[in-house]
Image: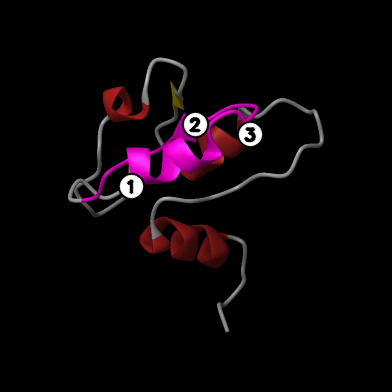
């Protein structure tokens, strides 16, 4: 999430519905540090590391907090938003 946004606006509505939360910085942008996401959040240096660190529980993955981040994930996956 970009540093000029508020993490709680994403985290609070999802309270009790997330199995885990992993925060990553947004490459090329000022982003919040790991402390902004709470004591139960984990931190990864990039999206690939975050995805590789997920448990193999088959649960869906929600990428949220920044359209910049979502765009980078789609581009890395060879997908173009339409």
Assess disc 2: are there few (<14), some (14-19) or many (≥20) residues with their C-alpha within 10 Å of its C-alpha. Answer: some
Decide which of 7, 73 is in the foreground and name it.
Answer: 7
Q: Quadrant of the C terminus?
A: bottom right
Q: Are marks 1 and 2 in contact (CB under 8 Å)?
A: no
Element carrying mark 2: strand
Mark 3–mark 2 Cα distance, whole angstroms, equals 14 Å
Instruction: List the residue tagged with mark 2.
Output: 22
Residue at 24% of width from left, 50% of height from top? 5
Q: Are marks 3 and 2 in contact (CB under 8 Å)?
A: no
Task: Give coordinates of residue 44: x percent, y percent.
Answer: 44, 30
- Most extreme residue toward the right is 58
Sequence-earlier tag: 1 or 2: 1
Please name which of the two marks, 3 or 2, marks the residue nearer to the observer. 3
User: Which coloring applies here?
Assistant: secondary structure
Residue at 52% of width from left, 57% of height from top? 73
Please name which of the two marks, 3 or 1, marks the residue nearer to the observer. 3
Q: In the figure, 69 relative to 37: above or below? A: below
Instruction: List the residue tagged with mark 3.
Output: 17
Element carrying mark 3: loop
Task: Give coordinates of residue 62: x percent, y percent.
Answer: 60, 47
Decide which of 1, 43 is in the foreground and name it.
Answer: 1
Q: Is residue 66 left or right of residue 81?
A: left
Task: Give coordinates of residue 59: x percent, y percent.
Answer: 77, 37
Q: Is residue 50 left or right of residue 36?
A: right
Instruction: List the residue tagged with mark 1.
Output: 1
Element carrying mark 1: loop
Q: Which mark is residue 28?
A: none
Assess disc 1: are there few (<14), some (14-19) or many (≥20) residues with their C-alpha within 10 Å of its C-alpha. Answer: many
Residue stretch in magenta: 5-24
């Amino acid at each position: 999430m970009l540093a000029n946004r508020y993490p709680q606006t994403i985290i609070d509505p999802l309270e009790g519905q997330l199995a885990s939360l992993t925060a990553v910085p947004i490459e090329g942008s000022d982003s919040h540090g790991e402390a902004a996401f709470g004591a139960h959040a984990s931190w990864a240096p990039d999206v690939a590391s975050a995805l590789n660190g997920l448990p193999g529980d088959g649960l869906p993955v929600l990428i949220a907090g920044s359209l910049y981040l979502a765009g980078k994930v789609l581009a890395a996956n060879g997908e173009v938003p339409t």
